[in-house]
Image (cartoon, helix red, strand yellow):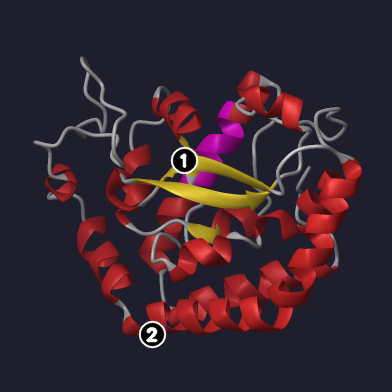
């Protein structure tokens, strides 16, 4: 499979991480997942659910929970309420992904170092937000903007995606569909990175395998099941987040 990245003169301006002369889908014309992902992307039911669910969360939950979380973040540590980072989205396009800040502002420069369960970069309120997945709430704005879906492969930060691509040849297949707030890999326990390189390598390969499996198995019922399991895990604080 042709690499998503240019070997020389790699470009980071704008919102794309591949050459302007490359057409992303042409890299996958021989991949049977291309047709499958096409139906995922054009599904009216999936997009309608994304919009309806995001509006509902914004109106009935985010409207009152946002001021509370923002206040707690401000009282707990200095710095902005939101953490905004470029992530790799559909067809390799970069977009600004929104999260509640969970780390000390001074440690944001170390954001590409995997977090551990007792990571001293994470604030007290940040631990709770990460454990319950509430730090991801602002991404419903990304969904409303059409950059993400409720369900799909989690979007990688650019640096992490490049690292993963060094040992996972077919990683770019996951970019055939919109990234999601939650996904099959996450409910299976493969969320985030760990400090041990070999263990992280193994977990990342499993996570990408689940991302690709999601594309193969996609249906609206599958999305509803993933959303249901995600909510159950959030309420039980069993998200493997740290």
Q: Residues within 10 Å of mark 1 (few under 14, many from 20)?
A: some
Q: Nearer the viewer, residue 108 or 181?
A: 108
Magenta span main SS = helix
User: Residue at position x 59%, y 76% from top?
Assistant: 225
Q: Is residue 4 left or right of residue 162?
A: left
Sequence-first disc among 2 and 1: 2
Q: Nearer the viewer, residue 171 or 182?
A: 182
- The picture places residue 102, in percent across and down from the top left corner, at 76, 43
* Residue identifier under label 2: 45
- The picture places residue 180, in percent across and down from the top left corner, at 50, 60
Q: Are marks 2 and 1 in contact (CB under 8 Å)?
A: no
Q: Residues within 10 Å of mark 2 (few under 14, many from 20)?
A: few
**The residue tagged with tag 1: helix, strand or loop?**
strand
- The picture places residue 184, in percent across and down from the top left corner, at 55, 60
Question: Is residue 150 at least partly visible in the picture?
Answer: no
Q: Quadrant of residue 136?
A: bottom right
Tell me which segment is drawn in magenta: 201-210
Q: Residue furthest top?
A: 8
* Residue identifier under label 1: 86
User: Residue at position x 24%, y 66% from top?
Assistant: 38
Front of the two marks 2 and 1: 1
User: Residue at position x 53%, y 65% from top?
Assistant: 141
Q: Residue furthest left?
A: 21
The numbered disc on residue 49 is none
Check residue 206 for magenta coloring.
Answer: yes
Q: Count the marks.
A: 2
Q: Nearer the viewer, residue 173 or 234?
A: 234
User: Which of the image's four quarters has the N terminus?
Assistant: top left
Check residue 180 for magenta coloring.
Answer: no
């Amino acid at each position: 499979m042709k690499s998503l990245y240019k070997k020389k003169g790699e470009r980071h301006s704008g919102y794309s991480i591949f050459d302007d002369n490359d057409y992303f889908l042409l890299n996958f014309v021989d991949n049977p997942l291309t047709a499958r992902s096409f139906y995922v992307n054009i599904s009216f039911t999936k997009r309608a659910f994304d919009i309806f669910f995001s509006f509902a969360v914004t109106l009935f939950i985010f409207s009152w929970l946002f001021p509370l979380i923002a206040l707690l973040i401000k009282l707990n540590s200095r710095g902005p309420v939101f953490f905004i980072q470029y992530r790799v989205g559909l067809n390799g396009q970069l977009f600004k992904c929104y999260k509640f800040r969970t780390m000390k502002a001074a440690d944001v420069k170390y954001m590409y170092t995997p977090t551990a369960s007792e990571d001293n970069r994470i604030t007290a309120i940040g631990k709770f937000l990460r454990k319950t997945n509430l730090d991801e709430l602002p991404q419903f704005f990304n969904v409303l903007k059409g950059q993400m879906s409720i369900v799909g492969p989690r979007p990688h930060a650019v640096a992490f995606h490049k690292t993963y691509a060094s040992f996972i040849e077919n990683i770019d297949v996951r970019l055939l569909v919109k990234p999601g707030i939650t996904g099959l890999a996450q409910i299976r326990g493969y969320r985030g990175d760990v400090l041990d390189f070999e263990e992280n390598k193994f977990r990342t390969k499993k996570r990408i395998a689940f991302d690709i499996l999601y594309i193969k198995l996609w249906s609206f019922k599958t999305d509803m099941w993933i959303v249901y399991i995600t909510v159950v895990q959030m309420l039980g604080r069993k998200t493997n987040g740290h």
